[in-house]
């Protein structure tokens, strides 16, 4: 048999039928449901009198609109009614649900892995573009729309077009304060926000093998920002160690049997990719986005682009527009740009490792006067683990607010949002116009860099915060 | 949904790359759980300033582009969030076809499910169309013939999957179609997968 990539193996293992014209009916093993993208999917089910084909293969949670200041009450009537609608839907359709006030509530892409719902070798969908995250487990995971969700609910199947493949090789040794977030941003800066459109991206190389699951998830999570719906890392012992013992993971003998199967989920020697990109990590500094698309990213020590120096008219226009929106002066250094807000959290960087990295910078220091800095754990389980380690104390002693779990200021659907002109150092995934609130300005970076910005009161180099 | 055949009218030119779904439909309106009436929020933060008045000169605030049947845009239109509300809002605004050199992949699929024809053409061709659109030349998108016609120019052919085209032309419901045609295949797939990966069937192992 022709050598196959991991993507091709996962794809082949889920083909129900060839539909012709390059399309395939693909079997969907798992579906994660949140309050914002699912209401219309359930309406379609109800209108058509359909039932869920396999209720146990879904997992629902409220994360996008939920407040993070408190639990128990929801002040915004629209958010309250949206979450109430989710709860009515999960009752009616018997969907397993992580309760709002329960121990498993959190961001879809954090609790999937934490509960063992996310397993290697599966197809996983969610009405959320950052579903790429779960590819870190060697799962074929991708975001879909509400209509597609409804098809998955009823049929456990979706029409899909097979993607091309792209290998991203990470070589070289990185600085201890260069994280997966920096690598992802550097990659997007290099290949562009549509650099991976139509491709399934697989991350390989010794640096990937050495990464903990949290960093692999960050890499795969950000893959959508390069235009690809699919990021992948082959499962290995690190993956199995993470999955083992989780509530929904196979147990005992079944787990051993699963590992044997998962061992086959590696790209074959000699498998070919449509594109190959190699990144030398020794050349990557901490990254900061300066514009309104994630590819508008630079090393922290760089100066802002000067549109007058950009030859390509399209690129020049994009840079002018972004600098104007961001309120930045061409040709000036990124370092020292004052920030009014700091957000540490999201499905990109809201895991325990991220909170540790932020706390390591914050330890014994104070958030600069006038900066509002919030830390929003990705899940209630993460929050609890962080409190067990004392991270909450370190962060609150430094002046950060310590919140309950949710998407919060990554999507600005609850009351955590910027006002026009506010500037935020953010560990989230999108610096789009208005993403963190209308007129808000977002600089994407790693948790260590965001913590450094909070302490300094401006964009700073986290490497200067360690002895 | 009713079927799609041909649409003719002005095309709004959006000569900009990476117009993401947050721009098309800002997240704060996602708290609305209906799919009807979302057109008023399409491109909200581009169309209106902070006090709610129209931003003068923005294409969608300019005649004859207030409810354009066609949008011509730069690469990566519809990138970012998977929110189908972006497509419902465009549909609510009156948009029935989007022409660009590349579209966000999830957005692309969402268009196909909602009676909006995604038209992918080479960048040079789109650049010409952007200029014609801005000049107010009428566009015709003919799904039956798979062509875009700009004014009196020769029709330009575009690609679309044959099944998707048929579904759009007939207004078919994808879920109905899958259930009607593939119920047995889905069951057969599950029977096979259950043998190889029994741990994926918790409803049986825990029962």
Image (spheres, coloured by chain):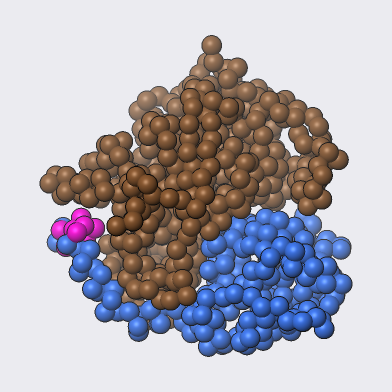
Chain colours: A brown, B blue
- Of residues A456 and B113, the one drawn nearer to the viewer in this rendering: B113
Q: Quadrant of residue A466?
A: top right
State which region is magenta: B196-205
* Residue closer to the observer: A376 or A401: A376
Q: Is residue B56 above or below residue A327?
A: below
The reply to whether residue B186 is visible in this rendering is yes
Front-most of residues A454 and A126: A126
Q: Quadrant of the C terminus of chain B?
A: bottom left
Q: Which part of the image, by quadrant, shows the N terminus of chain B?
A: bottom right
Q: Furthest residue to the left?
A: A253
Residue A377: say if magenta: no
Residue B197 lies in magenta, yes or no? Answer: yes
Q: Image point 61% across, 87% down: which residue?
A: B144
Name the residue at 25% across, 45% down.
A263
Q: Closer to the camera, A434 or A278?
A: A278
Using the image, determine if residue A416 lies above or below residue A128: above
Residue A190 x, y percent position in the rendering? 62, 41
Left or right: residue A341 compared with residue A221: right
> How far across and down, in percent of the image, does residue A366 sit?
59, 20
Secondary structure, magenta segment, majority class: helix
Q: Residue at x 68, y 42 (%)?
A: A296
Q: Is residue A112 visible?
A: no
Residue B49 coordinates in the image, percent (x, y): 79, 57
Give coordinates of residue A450: x percent, y percent. Answer: 59, 30
């Amino acid at each position: 048999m022709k050598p196959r990539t991991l993507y091709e193996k996962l794809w082949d293992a889920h083909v129900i039928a060839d539909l012709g014209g390059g399309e395939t009916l693909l079997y969907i093993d798992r579906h994660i449901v949140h309050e914002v993208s699912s209401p219309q999917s359930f309406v379609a089910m109800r209108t058509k009198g359909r039932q869920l084909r396999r209720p146990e293969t879904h997992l629902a949670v409220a994360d996008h609109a939920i407040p993070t200041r408190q639990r128990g009450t929801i002040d915004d009537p629209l958010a309250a009614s949206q979450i109430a609608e989710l709860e009515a839907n999960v009752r009616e359709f018997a969907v397993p649900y992580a309760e709002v006030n329960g121990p498993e509530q959190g961001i879809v892409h954090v609790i999937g892995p934490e509960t063992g719902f996310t397993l290697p070798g599966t197809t996983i969908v969610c009405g959320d573009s950052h579903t790429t995250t779960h590819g870190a487990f060697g799962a074929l995971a991708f975001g879909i729309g509400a209509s597609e969700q409804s098809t998955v609910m009823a049929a456990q199947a979706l029409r899909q077009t097979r993607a091309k493949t792209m290998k991203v090789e990470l070589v070289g040794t990185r600085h201890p304060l260069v994280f997966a977030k920096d690598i992802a941003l550097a990659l997007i800066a290099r290949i562009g926000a549509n650099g991976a459109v139509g491709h399934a991206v697989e991350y390989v190389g010794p640096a990937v093998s050495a990464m903990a699951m949290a960093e692999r998830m960050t890499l795969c999570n950000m893959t959508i920002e390069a235009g690809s719906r699919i990021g992948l890392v082959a499962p290995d012992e690190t993956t199995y160690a993470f999955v083992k013992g989780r509530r929904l993971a196979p147990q005992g003998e079944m787990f051993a049997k699963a590992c044997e199967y998962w061992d086959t989920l590696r790209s074959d020697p000699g498998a070919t990719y449509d594109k190959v990109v190699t990144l030398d990590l020794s050349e990557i500094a901490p990254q900061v986005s300066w514009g309104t698309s994630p590819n508008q990213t630079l090393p922290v020590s760089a100066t802002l682009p000067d549109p007058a120096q950009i030859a390509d008219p399209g690129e020049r226009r994009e840079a002018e527009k972004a600098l104007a929106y961001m309120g930045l002066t061409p040709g000036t250094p990124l370092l020292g740009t004052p920030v009014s807000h700091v957000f540490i959290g999201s499905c990109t960087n809201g895991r325990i490792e991220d909170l540790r990295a932020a706390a390591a910078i914050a330890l014994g220091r104070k958030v600069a006067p006038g900066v509002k800095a919030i830390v929003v754990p990705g899940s209630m389980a993460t929050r609890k683990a962080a409190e067990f380690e004392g991270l909450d104390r370190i962060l609150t002693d430094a002046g950060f607010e310590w919140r309950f779990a949710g998407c919060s200021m990554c999507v600005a659907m609850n009351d955590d949002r910027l006002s026009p002109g506010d500037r935020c150092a953010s560990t989230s995934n999108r610096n789009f116009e208005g993403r963190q609130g209308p007129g808000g300005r977002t600089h994407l970076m790693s948790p260590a860099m965001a913590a450094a910005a909070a302490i300094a009161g401006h964009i700073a180099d986290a490497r200067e915060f360690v002895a | 949904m009713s079927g799609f055949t041909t649409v003719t009218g002005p095309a709004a030119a959006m000569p900009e790359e990476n117009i993401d779904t947050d721009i098309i439909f800002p997240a704060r309106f996602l708290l609305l759980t209906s799919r009807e009436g979302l057109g008023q929020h399409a491109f909200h933060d581009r169309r209106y300033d902070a006090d709610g008045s129209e931003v003068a000169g923005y294409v969608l605030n300019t005649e004859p582009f207030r409810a354009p049947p066609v949008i011509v845009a730069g690469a990566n239109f519809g990138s970012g969030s998977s929110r189908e509300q972006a497509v419902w809002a465009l549909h609510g605004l009156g948009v029935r076809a989007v022409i660009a050199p590349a579209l966000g992949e999830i957005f692309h699929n969402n268009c196909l499910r909602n009676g909006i024809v995604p038209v992918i053409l080479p960048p040079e061709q789109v650049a010409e169309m952007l200029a014609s659109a801005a000049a107010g030349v009428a566009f015709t998108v003919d799904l039956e013939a798979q062509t875009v016609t700009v004014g009196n120019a020769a029709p330009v052919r575009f690609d679309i999957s044959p099944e998707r085209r048929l579904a759009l032309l007939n207004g078919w419901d994808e879920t109905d179609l899958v259930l009607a045609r593939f119920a047995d295949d889905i069951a057969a797939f599950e029977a096979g997968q259950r043998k190889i990966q029994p741990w994926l069937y918790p409803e049986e192992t825990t029962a």
